[in-house]
Structures are given as structure tokens and as C-alpha cells.
Image: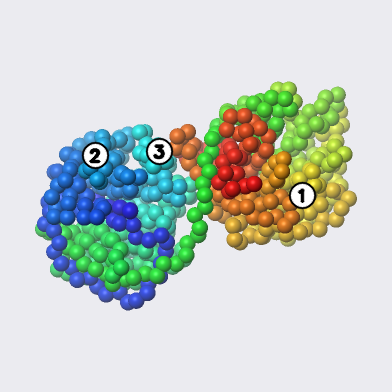
Amino acid sequence: MRFNCKPCLLPLLISLSAGHAQAATPVTAPTLKPWSTTKAQALGWLAGDQRLAVSKREGVLLLDAQGKTLSHVPGAFASLDSRALGDQVLVASHDEKKQQVALFSLNPQSHEWLAPVYLPRRDYAVNGVCLYRDEASNIYLFTVGEEGKGEQWLVAADRKRLNQPRLVRSLPLPPEAGLCQVDDAAHQLFVNEQKVGWWAYPAHAEAQASRVPVAMIEPFGEVKQAAGAMVPVPGGMLGLDPKAGELHLYQQQGKGWSPVARFPLKPLVEPEHLAVRQTPQGLDVWVQDADNNQLFEGRLSWNPVPVSVPPVLPVVKPSVQTDPVVSQGDAADDPAIWLHPHDPALSRVLGTNKKNGLEVYDLQGRRVQHLEVGRLNNVDVRPDFKLGTRTVDLAVATNRDHNSLSVFSIDRATGEVRAAGEVPTPLKDIYGLCLFKAPTGEIYSFANDKDGTFLQHRLSAKGEQVQGELVRQFKVATQPEGCVADDTHQRLFIGEEDVAVWALDARPEQPAALSSVINVGGPVHDDIEGLALYQGEKNSYLVISSQGNDSYVVLDAQPPYALRGAFRVGVNAEAGIDGASETDGLEVTSANLGGPFTQGMLVVQDGRKRMPEHSQNYKYIPWADVAKTLNLP
């Protein structure tokens, strides 16, 4: 069951659809008839014949079918929305006296209300609230405030209301916005701008803050005077023009919106608020006439035909997140995992800061080093390299300031990272990189250019510095970035961002003949970004960052590269860690690192740091959770 609402009237809505739809038959105007003369400012279905209402004089009320109050919360409340939460109902409203958003839990069977949890008082006047349930059943609250201020809060997770709601992100909204609604299935937030029109925003917590117009006021659209209350309907939206007394129905067409029908709302004098529920016969519509507080009901004969929507991917949670990188904006990019040879707890995660240098983190996510060496893009690690009189582990990164390879030594006892030389390249726009260790012990680097060129260098020591010898060159047709080498099978995987993942022989003396692993389309959405290899005792897997839909695809690492599944990294409410999106690089290990990482660890770059908003960082995910989620053997 799903409930939505509006300020003042705020009727609650039943769940409409699991996806988008297309209109089937012509739509006839609703014949509106008086329905109720309740003093409440809002009324809607809750469960069976129960309804919720909101009143600035009487508070929030639970009513029966005849309008009798079953229970209530006294006070002065304005906006209202609700979602089912286990066997409870989560109710959100704005307490006008406290000037804070309140979150109640209601037991619809016993009619009992639990004491509310309040959001901290904001520095703006809250005009409206609405709730959103994501694909992992987390519930978020949106606030719409004065002068375009808006926020998204995590308020429930794991079927429980949070005792302390967490601010996820701020949202730039229209300056005259006062109402909001969310279509959970489509992950769309609708906001009105009274003198301009209605807008649709991505509702997902990890989504970019962008908007598209649903409908505009004349002369830019067909709405005559004002964009008021709106309600998501299957595959579209109903919007109320209160000044013209008209109801508008819109159908979503791809990324845009098309008008379906427009109806006069006679005999209403001042229609203000709107609610809808779907029935087998069409859409039941409720509208309030502010002239006399009379509620009217009618029916739209619109029976949409549901169409398919993208499958809901399973979600795994990060256990740890790193400190944010020191640079703001699009800075973090590619991680690598360094394994301590004797004490797994002392292992490190190296992450590139493509505006500043190299970040080094411990397994708790704390930054232990920052090396300002230039704009590093991709990084990889291999053990046991002879550097002068010492045996060190090697890290290599692409340096976009110099179109070179920045080389680092890693102390095998302490994990300390030090600069150990720079290898020049003829590339004009160096980009991705990975390392390969041959059975002979030689370490090779593969670096690519945005024009598709790959260079393979043999790395060797010259005193205390590392040098590189170019041993092979090949090219793909379009821009690549991510790559990973399977040292055991001497195979190289490369990602051509908009095309495919390819495999080829990693040995320098062999021809660079490409064989297809997986193409863009299906589970992989361009861009193909990071590639990583999980090498277990029995099975090995290739992990791909499918940036186009914020997911991670897992394949067998051996031909025929069978698909094992895809997943997303979602919010860990208990640990206060947001999900991951817009992932560039990733890395994985099967080593037992202790704690939650006994079966290994996946590290992903997070392109949008939320909860709270900050510079980008990296998330650590237990491989055991990935294996369980995808039923990996």
C-alpha cells in the first residue's frame, strides 16, 4: 500500500502501479459529486475503510468510513504523506507550532500512534513534505521549502523508523515550490512551481540533481494559469490548475511528457487539492473545493496498459567508507588494494585523486597518507619488485599532468608509499592503467590513451628508480579506460567504454587479438569503467563497473565468461554510509582481511558522496555479501 499527500488537504494515495503505462481508451471527464463535509483539511484511504486526515485545528486523525475519529494526534499540522512500514504506517507531517517535520508510526489495527521522531529544525520554512520508498525498501522524506530550498532525509530502513533521521542531500528546487509527490516505481519526484509549471526530478538518493518539465503554463505550455497539486498515476501524472479550475492528465513518453486530456472541474468554485486511487474501472479522483471545504469525488475512465520497466537489481551494503578525498568535485577515480604479506589488518587501499595525487587508506577507511604528485587517474599494485638493494611492492598510476607513469614503492613491513620514479610515454591523453606480473616475475604496465591506444611497458629498476621499456602497442576503435590482468592465465581484460569488454593475451610477444567478453547492452550500460578480478580457490570472477545504471556486473573470469548477475551498492543506515553511484574504478581481492572481509573485499569509487554531502570517497563491501546476493558458487 502506498500513500501520498498535499499540503492543507493532503489526501493520501493507494499504490498505483509497478511501472509506467500507456493509455488504452479515450479518457472521459469525471462527474464530480459531493463526498464529505468533514472539517479535516485532508482525507484519504489508509487500509480497508480507514482513512487519514490532517487538520490545523484537530491534528492528525485516523477516521473510519463514516468520518468518525478512531484516534488522533493533537496539534496543528499542515503537510502530510505516508508509506506502509511493516505492519505499521509511517506518517510524515509538518508540526506548525514546533516548526519541525514529525514522523509518526501508526498501528492501523490497534489505532495507536507512537511518539513522533522530529527532524531538526531547518533554517527555512517547510512548505511541503512527501515520502519515497526505494528499491531496497528504504524510506526517504523530501522537504520543499521557501526560496527553493529542499532536502532529502533517510527516515526508515530495514523495516524500522530511524530514531535519528539522516540528512542525505540538499536539493535546488524552484523558488515558488510548495508541493511534492513521488512515484516510487519510477523513482520520480514531482514538484510544482506555481507560476511556471510542474517538474520531475530523479528521486533516488544517489541520483544527480536534474529536472525535466512535465508541463508549463501558457505561453510555454497548455496550462492556463497555475500549477497546483499533482499526483503520480500509472505512467503519468495528474495536475490541478486551481485558478482555471481544470484537471490535466499527462503521459510519460520516454524522457518527456505528453498531454492526454484536460477537464473542467464543475461545479467546484475553488478547487485546491487532489487525490487519486486506481480501481479496475479507472482512476477515482478526490478534489477539495476551498470555497466551502467540501470534498468531491469522481472517476476518470483511464485504464492504462502497464509496460515493462528495468528489472530491480539486488542491493548490497558497504561496511566501511573512506575519508573523502582532499579535492572537491569529480576527483576520486580508481582504487587498488595492497595486501600486507604477513598481517592482513595492515593492508592498504590506494585511491587516485585525479585533481591532486594519491590517497592511501587503512582498512577502517582512515587516510594514512596523501601524496601530491599530480593528476593521477588509474592505479594498480603488484608485489615483489627488486628496487636497488630492497624488495618492495610496486604501485603504478597514470599521471595526466605529464602523460607519464608515476611509480611508487610500498614498504612490505609498514605499508608506507613513496615515489619511485616516472616513466614517460608518447601518449597525448593518458587515461587508464593496469599491471601484469608474468610467471617469470617481470612486471608489465598497460596504459591507454583516450584515442584507444594501449602501450605495454616492461618495468625494471635502475638504482632506486623505476624505468619502463616499451614492448608492445595496440589499439581499439574508441575510448577505453578500465583494464585488469589475470596473471595466472596471462590474460588481459580491457574495457572499451561504449562498446564491450575484450580479452587478449597479456604476453608482450603475442599478437593483440581481441575476443569478446561482454558487449554494452543487456546488463552492462555504458560507460564501462573499472574492471577487477576476484580470484578464489575454486572460482574466479570478473567484476565490471556498469556506470550507466550505477551497477556492478559479475562474470566468470574464464571462457565462455558466463554472466553471474548484477547488483547495486546501497545505503547502510545502521553504519551511516550512503550507497555508491557513478562509479569509475573498482578493485577486489579474495584475501582474508578479517572482520567483515573474511572472504575478501570489493572497493568501489563513489561518484556522489551523500549522508552527508562531501567530496567523493571509496566504499568497502564484503565479498561474502556479493557472493550471497548473487548465489555465487
Q: Residue at x 37, y 49 (%)?
A: 132
Residue carrying label 2: 113
Q: Nearer the viewer, residue 513 or 114?
A: 114
| The image quarter in which residue 218 lies | bottom left
Residue 380, compared with residue 463, is above or below; it is: below
| The image quarter in which residue 518 lies | bottom right
Which of discs 3 and 1 lies nearer the camera? The answer is: 1
Residue type, label 1: Leu
Look at the numbered disc 1 and give the secondary structure of its residue: strand
Residue 285, compared with residue 609, is above or below; it is: below
Marks 2 and 3, the one that precedes in the sequence: 2
The image shows a total of numbered marks equal to 3
Q: Position of residue 356 (x, y in %)?
A: 63, 36
Residue carrying label 1: 492
Q: Residue at x 30, y 35 (%)?
A: 117
The coloring applied to the image is rainbow
Is residue 5 in view?
yes
Residue carrying label 3: 167
Q: Position of residue 379 (x, y in %)?
A: 70, 40
Label 3 crowding class (10 Å Cα cut-off): few <14, some 14-19, many 20+?
A: some
Q: Nearer the viewer, residue 554 or 400?
A: 554
Distance in Å between CA atoms under marks 2 and 3 = 24 Å
Q: Position of residue 605 (x, y in %)?
A: 59, 42
Q: Position of residue 197 (x, y in %)?
A: 33, 60
Residue type, label 2: Trp
Residue type, label 3: Leu
Q: Residue at x 82, y 27 (%)?
A: 391
Q: Nearer the viewer, residue 367 or 86?
A: 86
Label 2 crowding class (10 Å Cα cut-off): few <14, some 14-19, many 20+?
A: some
